[in-house]
Image: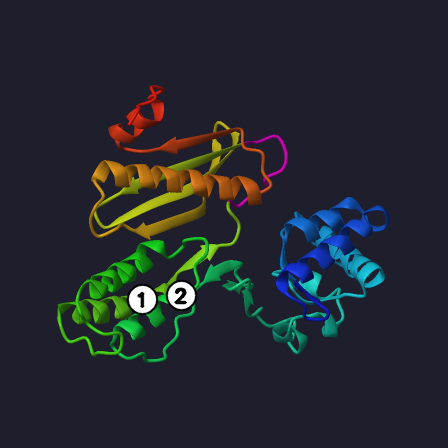
Amino acid sequence: MRVHVFGNKPSPSVATYGLHRTALDAKDSFGPDVTDFVLKHFYVDDGLISVPTEKQAVDLMKRTQHALAVHGNLRLHKIASNSKDVVREFDPDDLSKELKSLELSADLPVQRSLGLYWNMNIDTFTFQISSEEKPLTRRGVLSVINSIYDPLGFAAPVTIEGKLILRQLTVGSTGWDEPLIDIEGQKWQTWKRMLSDLQDVSIPRQYVPCSLQGNIRIKLHVFCDTSEKAIAAVAYIHVIYDENKHYVGFVIGKTKVAPPHGHTIPRLELCSALLAVEIFQLANEHLNIEFDSVRFYSDSRVVLGYITNQTRHSS
């Protein structure tokens, strides 16, 4: 479910503090799950949460609505859910604008949630690529790359190619608004045509097609690697029910363009290992899951040697 809190428009930090303070004040009256939802599943005034059943979703939303109204004079609305049964339980004025006039016999629409496009009908994340033509200049290239919002790294293998082209363009003396007519301009046009294929990609919203509650084991696997052009790291969740029932799901991935000079491959491999630790910390902080084990993978013996070396070298 996705929801939005309506109130005055102070700065994000003030708005967040006020929302959190209201949730804490409502804990005794409306339950700790309401407080937990607001504290852990909101980004400023937008909330996104998954619960096991439709009944739990409706109950949590209604209690949160009441709690914020009573303790903070805040309105929780713009509600969206991938379940039509949940949507039916709320007044149309409380629903997102795409759902207000929707016949519930029709397919659910694509909803933008925290910058991502969520196809509620099939419960997947998708991409919508702008068809607006940008000038073939360094400024136009940067504008196209920045238009792709991908905080979880779904499209990282694609977007890193655009960033590498942009880096190559910054090496020369081409101005920000000078037309690109050389080989890099041709590479850009090829990449841009390929970019439209992202609209055919659908990523399941759920990490795995099952509940993460119950008698299960959950592992996190984090891989890192590098090349002369880029460094990368990616994390996967591994859910084990029994010997014959395993699920693996993508959690988050990140790429960075490597500096054009001054770094050896071993140093870049260390940078990728650091990136792997950073995305683990991010997943560990925000997933609210207790992992049974976490494993890191690198194919660089130099990195493994540095990590296991307990000797302190003096300069």
> What residue is drawn where x is 25% and y is 28%?
301
What color scheme is it? rainbow
Foreground mark, 2 or 1?
2
Mark 1 packing: few (<14 Cα in 10 Å), some, or many (20+)? some
| Real-space Cα separation, disc 2 to disc 1, in angstroms | 10 Å
The location of residue 260, given as percent across then percent down, is 21, 52
The location of residue 161, given as percent across then percent down, is 27, 59
> What residue is drawn where x is 72% and y is 53%?
20
The location of residue 96, given as percent across then percent down, is 65, 71
Majority SS type along the magenta span: loop
Q: From what the image shows, is residue 180 above or below residue 32?
A: below
Q: Which residues are magenta?
A: 208-217
Q: 234 or 193: which is nearer to us?
A: 234
Is residue 128 something that shows in the picture?
Answer: yes
Mark 1 lies on a secondary structure that is helix
Q: Which mark is residue 219?
A: none
Mark 2 lies on a secondary structure that is loop
> What residue is drawn where x is 81% and y is 65%?
73
Q: Residue furthest top?
A: 311
Q: How many labels sit on residues?
A: 2
Mark 2 or 1, nearer chain start: 2
The location of residue 62, given as percent across then percent down, is 78, 59
Q: 21 or 134: which is nearer to us?
A: 21
Residue annotated with mark 2: 148
Say what amino acid the circle numbered 1 marks.
Leu
> What residue is drawn where x is 61% and y is 30%?
215
Residue annotated with mark 1: 195
Do the residues bearing badges 2 and 1 touch, measured as CB atoms within 8 Å? yes
Relative to residue 11, is residue 68 drawn left or right?
right
